[in-house]
Image: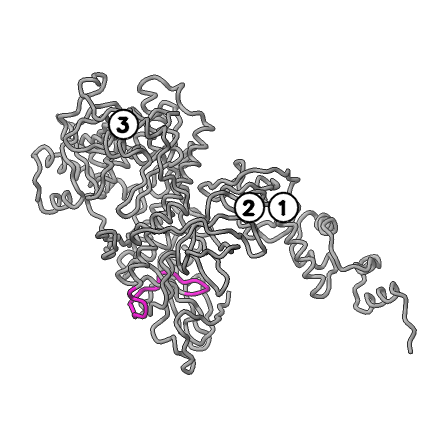
C-alpha cells in the first residue's frame, strides 16, 4: 500500500495535477480554501484597472470547476446587493465611490421609490414598499437597501388563495408579489379580496395576517374600494377641511366683486360629458371687429384660488390628493364637493368667479395677442359633447342665437388650430379604446370611444390657453409648474424604427422630430388595424411630468406648456393660477420657492401616476368580470403584442387583452424575433405576427388581477390528443 502523503503535500499535488498553478507559482488552493473574500474580489478588479467583465474576472481569479465559479458568482451578487460593486451598461464590474449608511422611510415618486429624496435601487428579495423604514447605503446617488427596520403600516390589498392547509395573498395594483399568511383566517374564502397587515418577512417574502375582508354590494363597488385601498388614495376628509368648506359662501354675490370685469352678458358655455359635475372651463368666440381678420377666443376658468388659499387646510389636503380620481360612477375629488361641484363649478345660470384668458387668433391658428384678468361670469348653457356634435354636423339645436354664433366661430377657430397643429407636427395617434357602459352598478356593455369634433374643439381651445399661461409667466420671469413631455427613449425608438422598416416606412436616425414620427404613423393609419402601430409608438414615449424646468412638450410639439384649465381637479393648475394672480396683483413675494416647486412637481407627478394606475386597475377588473360568462367560448381577436413568452390577443369588441402563453401554441419550439415582433415554429414554420387575426378560447379569467388566459382554437388537444384540463398548463420554452 502506498503511504499517505501529508495533507499540505496532497493539496499541492492535486493542484499541480489539475494545472491550476497561479502566476509566480501561487495558487488559490495554497491556502487550503475555495472561498473567495470580498477584499480578494475588490483587489482583482483594482488590478484590472478598475473595470472587468465576468469572463475576465473568472480568468483573473483562476477559479476552476463549478464549485469555485458558483462561489465567485455568489460573492459578486452579494457585493452588488450591498452596493460595494456595480455593473455598467457593458456588464463590467467596478467599485463605486464610497457610500454612507443611513436610515429613512420609503416614499413613492413618479419614477419609482425614494428615501430621503434619493432613488431606491429595486430589490425584489426585500419586497420594499412605501412606508417601510430601511437601512441603506448611498452609492453614486442611489440608495441601496440593506435591511427593513420597520414594515409599513399600510396594508397589502390582494386576493386570498388557499393551497390545502396553507394560504397566501396575491397583491393587487402597485403592490407586487405575495404575502404568506401566518394565521389561517376563519371568515375568508378562496378568491376574497382582503387587506393584510404585514408582520415580517421569510425566505419567501412578506408574511402577515388578514386585517379585513373588502366587501361590497356590487363588483363595481368592490373594485373601486380595493383600488382606493391598494393605491392608498385618501378618500375621507379631515375634520379641519370639513369645517373650512362649511365656512365658504354658498353663492357668489355679483355686486361684491367690482374690481373684476363683468362678463355675465357674454355667451360663455361649458361643453362636457353627460355625467360631468365639476365644470372647470367655459368658452366663447367671436370674429374680431373692424378690418382685422381672425377671432377673439375667451377661455374662462373657475377661480379656485379665490377660495383655496395657499397653506390653508383645504390647500394642504389638495396637495396630498394632487388630483381628482375618476372611476365609473364614482369620483374621489381633490377638493370637497361644496367647492368642486358647487361654489367653483361653472354651472349654468349661476354667477361664478373666473380667471380669464382672452386671446386673439389669426387665420393661421396662431395666438397673436392675449390677456389674463379676473372676471365675474355667467354660464349661458351646460352643453354636452354629443349635442354640440349634432349642431356642428347637422344644425340641430335648442339654444339661443348668441350661443349658436359663438359655436360657429369656435368651429372656425378649431379648424385654424387644427391646421396649425398639423403644421408644427404634433402627434395625433389613432385611438382604440373602450368605455364601460354601466347600469345600476353593473357593466352592461363595452362601447368604442368616439373622438368627436366637439372633443377636439374644446381640446384645442384649452391647449391655446395653457400655452398662453406659460408664455405669460415666462415673460414676467415668474416660475410655476410646466407640463413636460421629453423626447422618446432612444433605445425604444431604435426598436420602433427597425420594426417600421419592415413595413416599408422609414424613420431618420437619431432623435426623431414629432412631425417625422407623425408622418410615418400617418402612412400606416389606413392599414387594417393601423392603431397597433400607434400603440407601438406610444410605448416609446416617456411619461409626461410636472416640473419647474421647461423642457418642452414633445407630443404636442410645443416649446413651452403648462396646465392652467382644470384647477378644480388638478393641483398643478392651481399652482399656475396662483402665479398668474400674484403677478396681476403685484404679490410675487408670496409665491413658492424653486425648491418648493420642484417638490410639488414630483409630488403631483406621483399622484397623477397613482390616479391613472387605480383607474386602469378598476377598468381591467370590470372588463374581465364582464368577460367571465364567456369562459369556454371561442372568440375572434387580433395579436396586439408579441413577446418571447407568448401572444397578447385583443378580443374583438371587448377592448381587453388576454395572454396566449407560448406553452399553449402546440407541440413546437418557437423562436422570438423582436425586430419583426413574431414567433416562428422551428418544425412547423408556423408564424405569429403582430396584427394577425386569430380565434381564441377563453380559458380562464381572474378579474381582480385583470388577467385573461387564452388558448388558440384547436390547440388544447394537439400533439396526439394529449389534451390538458382547463386551469392547468404545461411547460414551454422560447429561444431568446
Range drawn in magenta: 629-646
Q: Residues within 10 Å of mark 1 (few under 14, many from 20)?
A: many
**Horizontal relation, residue 501 to residue 126: left or right:** left
Q: Earlier in the sequence, mark 1 or mark 3?
A: 1
Image location (x, y in percent) of residue 106:
52, 41
What residue does disc 1 label?
A: 83
Task: Evaluate if marks 2 and 1 touch, with contact meaning CB atoms under 8 Å apart.
Answer: yes
Which label sits on residue 121? 2
Task: Say which residue appears at 24% left-offset and 42% top-offset.
Answer: 419
Q: Is residue 174 visible?
A: no
Q: Is residue 107 magenta?
A: no
Q: Tell which of 408 and 384 is nearer to you.
A: 384
Which label sits on residue 303? 3
Label the magenta part by its dominant secondary structure.
strand
**Horizontal relation, residue 170 to residue 250: left or right:** right
Image location (x, y in percent) of residue 665:
41, 72
Q: Is residue 231 visible?
A: yes
Task: Say which residue appears at 39% left-offset and 56% top-offset.
Answer: 192
Tell me the element at label 1. Answer: loop
Task: Say which residue appears at 72% left-offset and 50% top-offset.
Answer: 38
Q: Residues within 10 Å of mark 2 (few under 14, many from 20)?
A: some
Task: Evaluate if marks 1 and 3 touch, with contact meaning CB atoms under 8 Å apart.
Answer: no
Amino acid at each position: 500500500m502506498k503511504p499517505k502523503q501529508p495533507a499540505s503535500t496532497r493539496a499541492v499535488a492535486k493542484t499541480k495535477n489539475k494545472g491550476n498553478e497561479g502566476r509566480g507559482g501561487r495558487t488559490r488552493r495554497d491556502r487550503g480554501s475555495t472561498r473567495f473574500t470580498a477584499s480578494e474580489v475588490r483587489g482583482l478588479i483594482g488590478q484590472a484597472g478598475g473595470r472587468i467583465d465576468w469572463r475576465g474576472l473568472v480568468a483573473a481569479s483562476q477559479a476552476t470547476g463549478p464549485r469555485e465559479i458558483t462561489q465567485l458568482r455568489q460573492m459578486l451578487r452579494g457585493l452588488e446587493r450591498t452596493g460595494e460593486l456595480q455593473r455598467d451598461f457593458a456588464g463590467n464590474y467596478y467599485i463605486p465611490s464610497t457610500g454612507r449608511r443611513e436610515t429613512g422611510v420609503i416614499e413613492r415618486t413618479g419614477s419609482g421609490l425614494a428615501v430621503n429624496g434619493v432613488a431606491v435601487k429595486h430589490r425584489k428579495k426585500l419586497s420594499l414598499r412605501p412606508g417601510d423604514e430601511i437601512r441603506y447605503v448611498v452609492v453614486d446617488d442611489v440608495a441601496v437597501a440593506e435591511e427593513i427596520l420597520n414594515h409599513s403600516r399600510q396594508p397589502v390589498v390582494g386576493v386570498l388563495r388557499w393551497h390545502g392547509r396553507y394560504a397566501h395573498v396575491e397583491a393587487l395594483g402597485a403592490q407586487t408579489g405575495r404575502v404568506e399568511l401566518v394565521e389561517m383566517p376563519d371568515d375568508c374564502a378562496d378568491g376574497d379580496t382582503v387587506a393584510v397587515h404585514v408582520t415580517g418577512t421569510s425566505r419567501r417574502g412578506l408574511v402577515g395576517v388578514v386585517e379585513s375582508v373588502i366587501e361590497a354590494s356590487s363588483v363595481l363597488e368592490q373594485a373601486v374600494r380595493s383600488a382606493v385601498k391598494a393605491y392608498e388614495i385618501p378618500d375621507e376628509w379631515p375634520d379641519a377641511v370639513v369645517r373650512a368648506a362649511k365656512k365658504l359662501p354658498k353663492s357668489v354675490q355679483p355686486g361684491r366683486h367690482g374690481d373684476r370685469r363683468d362678463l355675465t352678458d357674454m355667451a360663455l358655455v361649458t361643453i362636457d360629458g353627460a355625467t360631468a359635475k365639476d365644470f372647470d372651463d367655459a368658452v366663447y368666440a367671436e370674429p374680431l371687429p373692424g378690418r382685422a381678420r381672425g377671432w377673439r377666443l375667451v377661455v374662462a376658468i373657475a377661480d379656485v384660488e379665490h377660495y383655496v388659499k395657499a397653506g390653508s387646510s383645504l390647500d394642504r389636503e389638495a396637495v396630498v390628493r394632487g388630483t381628482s380620481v375618476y372611476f365609473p360612477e364614482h369620483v374621489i375629488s381633490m377638493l370637497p364637493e361644496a367647492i368642486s361641484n358647487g361654489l367653483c363649478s361653472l354651472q349654468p345660470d349661476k354667477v361664478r368667479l373666473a380667471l380669464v384668458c382672452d386671446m386673439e387668433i389669426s387665420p393661421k391658428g396662431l395666438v397673436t395677442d392675449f390677456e389674463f384678468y379676473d372676471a365675474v361670469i355667467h354660464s349661458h348653457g351646460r352643453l354636452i359633447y354629443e349635442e354640440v356634435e349634432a349642431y356642428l354636423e347637422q344644425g340641430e339645436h335648442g339654444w339661443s342665437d348668441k350661443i349658436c354664433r359663438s359655436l360657429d366661430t369656435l368651429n372656425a377657430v378649431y379648424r385654424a388650430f387644427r391646421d396649425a397643429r398639423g403644421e408644427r407636427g404634433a402627434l395625433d395617434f389613432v385611438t382604440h379604446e373602450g368605455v364601460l357602459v354601466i347600469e345600476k352598478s353593473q357593466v352592461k356593455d363595452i362601447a368604442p370611444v368616439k373622438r368627436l369634433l366637439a372633443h377636439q374643439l374644446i381640446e384645442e381651445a384649452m391647449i391655446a390657453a395653457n400655452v398662453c399661461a406659460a408664455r405669460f409667466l415666462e415673460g414676467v420671469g415668474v416660475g410655476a409648474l410646466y407640463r413636460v413631455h421629453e423626447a422618446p427613449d432612444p433605445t425604444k425608438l431604435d426598436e420602433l424604427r427597425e420594426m417600421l422598416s419592415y413595413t416599408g416606412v422609414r424613420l431618420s436616425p437619431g432623435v426623431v422630430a414629432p412631425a417625422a414620427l407623425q408622418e410615418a404613423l400617418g402612412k400606416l393609419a389606413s392599414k387594417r388595424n393601423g392603431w397597433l402601430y400607434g400603440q407601438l409608438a406610444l410605448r416609446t414615449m416617456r411619461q409626461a411630468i410636472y416640473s419647474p424646468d421647461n423642457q418642452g412638450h414633445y407630443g404636442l410639439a410645443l416649446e413651452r406648456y403648462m396646465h392652467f384649465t382644470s384647477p378644480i381637479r388638478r393641483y398643478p393648475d392651481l399652482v399656475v393660477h396662483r402665479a398668474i394672480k400674484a403677478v396681476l396683483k403685484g404679490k410675487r413675494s408670496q409665491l413658492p420657492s424653486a425648491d418648493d416647486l420642484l417638490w410639488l412637481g414630483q409630488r403631483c407627478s406621483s399622484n397623477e401616476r397613482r390616479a391613472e394606475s387605480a383607474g386602469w386597475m378598476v377598468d381591467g377588473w370590470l372588463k374581465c368580470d364582464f368577460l367571465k360568462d364567456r369562459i369556454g367560448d371561442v372568440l375572434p381577436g387580433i395579436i396586439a403584442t408579441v413577446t418571447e413568452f407568448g401572444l397578447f390577443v385583443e378580443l374583438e369588441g371587448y377592448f381587453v387583452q388576454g395572454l396566449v402563453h407560448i406553452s399553449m401554441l402546440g407541440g413546437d419550439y418557437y423562436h422570438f424575433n423582436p425586430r419583426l415582433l413574431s414567433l416562428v415554429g422551428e418544425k412547423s414554420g408556423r408564424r405569429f405576427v403582430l396584427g394577425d387575426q386569430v380565434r381564441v378560447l377563453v380559458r380562464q379569467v381572474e378579474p381582480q388581477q385583470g388577467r385573461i388566459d387564452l388558448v388558440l382554437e384547436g390547440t388544447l388537444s394537439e400533439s396526439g390528443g394529449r389534451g390538458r384540463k382547463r386551469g392547468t398548463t404545461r411547460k414551454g420554452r422560447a429561444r431568446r
